[in-house]
Image: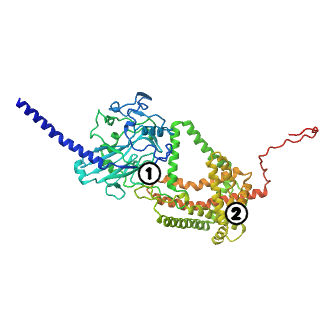
Amino acid sequence: MAIRISVVVAVLVLCLAAATPASASESATQRLVDAYSPIVMLRAQHDVCNTSQEQYAPPTTVNTVLGNPRVQLLEHVGRRMVVKGRGPGAAELAGLGGNFYLNLPGNPLQPGCTYARAFRQLRRAGRAPAVTYAHIAREPGHSGFALQYWFYYYFNQFNDLHESDWEGMQITFAAPNATRALAVGPDQIVVFQHSGGEHTSWDDSKVEKRGRHPVVYSAAGSHATFYRSALWLGTGQNGSGVGCDNTTAPLTASHPGAVLLPDTIPRTGRFAWLDYYGHWGQREAGFNDGPQGPNTKKVWKTPFSWMDGTRTRSPEVPGDSLMGPTVSHTFCGAVATVSRYINLKAQTSPGAIAIAVGIIVLVALPLILTSWWPVQLEPLRTARAGGQIILAAGRFCGRHLASLVLIAVVALLAVGLLDALEWLVRHLLSARRAGGSFTDSGYTSAPSPALSIGRTIATPFAAAIVIAFIRNLERGQDARLPATTMAVLRRLWRLIAVHILILVALAVLVATVIGIPIAIVKFIDWQFAEQEILYEDRKIRDALRGSTRLVRGHRWHTGTVAVALWVLSQAPAVLLGAAFIFTSIPAVDINLLGAVIYALLVVYVSSGRTLLYLDLAYRHAHEPAPARRTWRLRRKRAEPAAVPGTSSA
């Protein structure tokens, strides 16, 4: 009996001895995971349906999908999708391959507010807590280990649209185990951005920390992770995605609880979903396909090799351009527009084809119907077809290149000077009061480009100098820069006021939606308010009326030429934006180049619009006046033999 008791005691002692190191190791790992769990900054949501805000915050648990009776498990067999069940749990997903899909309620290509409202309901029901999944990853041939934090989001609302989204970050330690890692600290960090990432030293100043916790910024909708708040440019290089990731203010902080995943993928238990190699969303073409889980990613298996292939900096979209449309912002808008078209094509190819054909017809028809030759500059005041005006404006600029380039330089200098004065005033005012901070990390927001005094004044100022230059040339007067500038300065307040008045009036009409047709008509009618002020020295109201009177009967001619000139002024920004994909030129430099080109185009467009004005003035003087339309009901012509006592209608 005593021998049996001794054997039992010995076995228990051996078991406890074997279990103690594992328990201690597990405890140290959990302490490490908790110590470095990230703080995630997300764009604050004030409207559940606003896609510019983060609709799927915070990063959450996979249990929003698993066990959800509204979620289908589908298998792709041949060309069919076969329903295999509803509300699958972790155990039901274990072992399934890449031909399986989790289908959330809704259509990802037409998300509307469906997914945002569904996620809000999950949050209100307490089924979407803030969670990050922690994973210890090692790689043969590399000492130390990587601590990965995976973020799961219910939906991806970006240029690509897909159900579920996986992003995250990792920290590396040059230590053999968690206990030693807690003592020595991390050496590197990498944040996940679409299929790529950005790595740096843990001690780099751009890595924001609160204690040991790194602060990272999740882009609205796309959930790509960054080190600070900004608008980030993705050109597709190094897996960075194509488009612009927005981590700007207003922001809110999320402190997701860290859930430690097992080192090896289990086949059973609560983490059996790690053995699922299928898709976490609906099957769609290309980038809209539901993503596969972390266990399928290269970084999961080879964390160090993958990290070495990521970039060391993320290009930031400059907040402003010196003059004209910001090239990088134009690139962002162009990518979003193309993405929407691709998504439309995925839903309805006939509809997408119809839109493409319609655009081609709208562009090609005016080009075919107009006359392009001959192109004559003398006299300046004469009738010309739309194509002749466009070419004549180019020939005019070539003939007077030196004078017009000087005007463009003056415009750039004026913008720079006025912007510098505006910045100085804002800086002095902000020095007197605390404010401007949009996060508690200390970054301050720059003035809105839309409020720039420089652009508001200098662009119409430069255009007006060109108009005065052409006016003086036609009249045989002094067309040198001092004389034309003085002619503009004497009327400057009217020129700026009429410019702002037109912009505000058109914006108000467009905002009402039903006023859009009227806005289009008035956009054409008011094309020549500046010319009326400089040529006829009219007051603001008379200038608007004079422009409308001149355009009457020639709206199609005026509208097509005006739109063509506007498109030509915007084209360089689009083309330079496309160059981002193929060049490594910094966005600031490309924006500066875009500003210079735009300043030259202001000169060209102003020349074209003034030649169009002279064309209409010639027609107005030499052609019969068009009948003026009226909204009053026409009276019936009286009968010659009216019966007395009766009245005509």
Looking at the rendered structure, the kind of residue marked 2 is Ile
Q: Which mark is residue 299?
A: none
Residue 503 quadrant: bottom right
Is 284 on the left or on the right of 199, as rendered?
right
Give the number of the mark in front: 1 or 2.
Answer: 1
Residue at point 53% right, 60% down?
595
Whole-percent x and y of residue 374? 69, 56
Residue bearing the label numbered 1: 251
- Residue 363, compared with residue 115, is above or below; it is below
Whole-percent x and y of residue 357? 59, 41
Looking at the rendered structure, the kind of residue marked 1 is Leu
Please name whichever residue, 177 or 301, is drawn nearer the observer in this view of the structure.
177
Numbered disc 2: secondary structure: helix
Residue bearing the label numbered 2: 533
Is 529 on the left or on the right of 405, as rendered?
right
Please name whichever residue, 255 or 628, is drawn nearer the observer in this view of the structure.
255
Please name whichever residue, 197 or 181, is drawn nearer the observer in this view of the structure.
181
Whole-percent x and y of residue 33? 29, 46
**Reading the chain from its start, which is encountered first: label 1 or label 2?**
1
